[in-house]
Amino acid sequence: MTASVFGVQLDELDSEGQLLRELGRMLDDGRPHRVFTPNPEILLLARGDKAFASVLNTADLALPDGTGVALVGTIRTRRRIRRWPGVEIGAELLRLASTRDEGVVLLGGRDGVAERAASRWRSTLPGVRVEAVGSDVTFGRDGRPADPAIEDQLVERIRSLAPAVVLVGLGAPKQERWIAEHAELLPSARVLMGVGGAFDMWGGTLRRAPEWMHAVGLEWLWRLLLEPARLPRIARATLVFPVLALVDRT
């Protein structure tokens, strides 16, 4: 069953067990699967950019990330829609990959954050095979490096690592566009997912909100306290998005 916000289709999963079964099915399959977690900012981008909305709709699994998205989906469908933070789904993929002896690539990040995230996972999850790639590359809004030669080198580097999972931390819309462009170019990859700022949290650069804030949907307040400069983005996510989503029924 699915909900739709601004023309972007969102899937519904009810439990961690259902999520793990779905991810396991993807890893068992022989083709690449795209996993996106649209949050209010991503959906607002899609509302003004139909080409980006089309990219999001190539997802094999698109789960609502954020209390506001889940609430809007619940109101529209009259069914309880659960939210799924991308950082948590990415962590589950790393754990699943480690139990299967599958490789994982962390693509993107900046200032060494992906390397720190990979190092932390190797120390906390014995046996996990995870490598950071492309943290020194600047990506354009289309999800591509400015230098085509660098793009080719990047793809070859990932191919040489033969990962089953590629977690892309470029931020929207770069990461979703990169995945859409490159999923078929990586023969080993069976799950490619956009994870936004997850590398910062895994690497210790940014602390996640306390559990009680997650429970009541106040992660945005935590981010505002840590990063006051995010105020305009947070205002769009917490104020502009719900108003537009309730008025615009597409």
Image: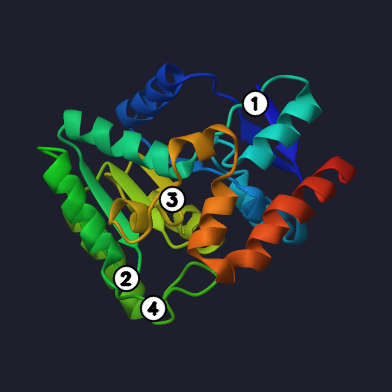
Task: Give the vertical position of 178 relative to 58 (above or below).
Answer: below
Report the side of 18 relative to 101 (left or right). right
Q: Nearer the viewer, residue 169 or 215?
A: 215
Mark 3 → mark 4, Cα distance in angstroms: 24 Å
Q: Amino acid at mark 3?
A: Val
Q: Which residue is mark 2?
A: 152
Callout 1: helix, strand or loop?
loop
Q: Amino acid at mark 4?
A: Pro
Report the side of 229 relative to 209 (left or right). right
Instruction: Characterize the local packing of mark 3: few (<14), some (14-19) or many (20 or more) Cα atoms within 10 angstroms.
Output: many
Which x, y percent locates residue 61?
Answer: 52, 34
Instruction: Characterize the local packing of mark 2: few (<14), some (14-19) or many (20 or more) Cα atoms within 10 angstroms.
Output: few
Q: Mark 2–mark 4 contact, CB under 8 Å?
A: yes
Mark 2 → mark 4, Cα distance in angstroms: 6 Å
Q: Please report the residue visible at 73 percent of the width from the left and 27 percent of the height from the top.
A: 74
Q: Which residue is mark 4?
A: 148
Which x, y percent locates residue 231?
Answer: 64, 66
Q: Please report the residue visible at 41 percent of the width from the left and 17 percent of the height from the top.
A: 17
Q: Which residue is mark 1?
A: 81
Q: Mark 2–mark 3 contact, CB under 8 Å?
A: no
Label of residue 243 in the image = none
Mark 4 → mark 1, Cα distance in angstroms: 41 Å
Which x, y percent locates residue 95?
Answer: 25, 33
Q: Which residue is mark 3?
A: 195
Callout 4: helix, strand or loop?
helix
Callout 3: helix, strand or loop?
loop
Q: Of the residues tagged 4 and 1, which is closer to the observer?
A: 1
* Residue 172 visible (yes or no): no
